[in-house]
Image: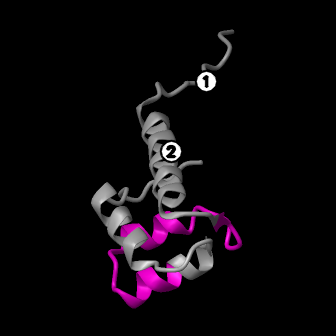
Amino acid sequence: MQYTNRLPSEKDMIWLSKLTTSYPVTRREILRIARMWNFKPEVVSFLRLFAPDQLFETRTDFVARCESLALLIRQEWEAPKETIQSPQD
């Protein structure tokens, strides 16, 4: 995935889920709400990782999927980097 931006805080994602009053909601709509409420750039860039037509059924679904994605990104960051060694002559 190679996501290099700062991850949003869980607090920001919960607050965004509360500002989104109508569920189910698409990523496109939740992104519009985040921009309308002037959420930090890391929230906007993180939301863009989901497909534009991604559907979140409930607040809990939205927050849980954000947490899962953030966990995957952290695991990727913490994973040992593989190095390719050239064959020795």
**Is residue 1 toward the left or the right of residue 20 in the image?**
right
The residue pinned by badge 2 equals: 68
Please tell me which residue lies in front, 34 or 6. 34
Asked where in the image residue 9 lies, by quadrant, the reply is: bottom left
Is residue 42 on the magenta stretch? yes
Q: Residue furthest top?
A: 89
Seen in the picture, residue 22 relative to 66 is either above or below; the reply is below
Seen in the picture, residue 21 relative to 51 is either above or below; the reply is below
The residue pinned by badge 1 equals: 84
- For the point 32% across and 69% down, which residue is it? 15
Asked where in the image residue 29 lies, by quadrant, the reply is: bottom right
Q: Secondary structure beneath disc 2?
A: helix
- Residue 87 in percent (x, y) is at 68, 14
- For the point 47% across and 80% down, which residue is it? 21
Seen in the picture, residue 20 relative to 68 is either above or below; the reply is below
Marks 1/2: CA–CA distance: 30 Å
Please tell me which residue lies in front, 59 or 83. 59
Is residue 41 on the magenta stretch? yes
Badge 2 crowding class, 10 Å Cα cut-off, few under 14, some 14 to 19, many 20 or more, is few
First-in-chain label (1 vs 2) = 2
- Residue 40 in percent (x, y) is at 32, 75
Please tell me which residue lies in front, 67 or 8. 67
Instruction: Provide the residue span drawn in magenta.
Output: 31-55
Q: Residue type at mark 2?
A: Ser
